[in-house]
Image (tube, rainbow, N blue to C red):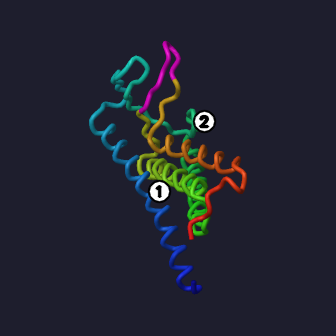
Amino acid sequence: MSVDSARASAAAIAWRWWALAISVAAADQVTKLAVSTLMDYGQSIPLTGFFNLVHVWNTGAAFSFLADAGGWQRYFFIVITLGVSFVLIILLRKSRPRAEALGYSLILGGALGNGFDRVVRGYVVDSLDFYWRSWHWPAFNLADCSITLGVLCLLWSAYRTPAEQQSPEP
């Protein structure tokens, strides 16, 4: 395989992972638009005995960390998102085991989805509310699910022995 064809193959693989990340971010934005359009802020629709569809805003990070910090946190989280996204884009340019590349791609898609919210809205729209009796898990969204799944993929990939890992894509 020539150097040029190896570069073209690596670029095609990178574009596949980037396309997955963009698809995750787009699906996240579609769900947030639907919730924002079809539900009033603060509205909760019980769907099961353990799950509500809600419309809430989060100006902080996970579990509303720094939500009441006065506004500066929006720009802080935008800068963090840009930095993390840049690093993940670069990491996905190299051939990696599939589980690792999938993890990076899912984290990138979630970061882009929530980052877009912070830039455009100034807050992140959350809509998934799981609970048990009177205990509620903090509401979250599709981007948060993607980030969590991405981290799980990375952990799974990291704890596998080298012989167990799938070979990187060509």
Q: Is residue 8 left or right of residue 168?
A: left
Frontmost residue, 69 versus 14: 14
Q: Main secondary structure of the magenta part?
A: strand
- In the image, is residue 130 part of the stretch drawn in magenta? yes
- Dividing the picture into quadrants, the one containing residue 45 is top left
Q: With 55 as the anchor, is 156 left or right in this view?
A: right
x and y percent of residue 170 in the render?
Answer: 57, 71
Mark 1: which secondary structure? helix
The residue at the point 51 percent across, 79 percent down is: 8
Residue 144 location (% of width, % of height)? 51, 41
Q: Magenta stretch containing residue 158, yes or no?
A: no
Outermost left residue: 38
Q: Is residue 6 above or below residue 142?
A: below
Q: Residue at x 34, y 23 (%)?
A: 47
Q: Position of residue 6 (x, y in %)?
A: 56, 79
Residue on which the image places disc 1? 21
How far apart are the two marked residues, 2 and 1, measured between alpha carbons?
Answer: 25 Å
Looking at the image, do the residues carrying marks 2 and 1 touch, with CB atoms under 8 Å apart?
Answer: no
| Amino acid residing under circle 1 | Ala
Q: Position of residue 157 (x, y in %)?
A: 65, 50
As drawn, the label of residue 65 is 2
User: What residue type is disc 2 on?
Assistant: Phe
Q: What is the span of residues highlighted in magenta in the rendered image?
A: 128-136
In which quadrant of the rendered image does the N terminus lie? bottom right
Q: Please, what secondary structure does the residue beneath circle 2 have?
A: loop
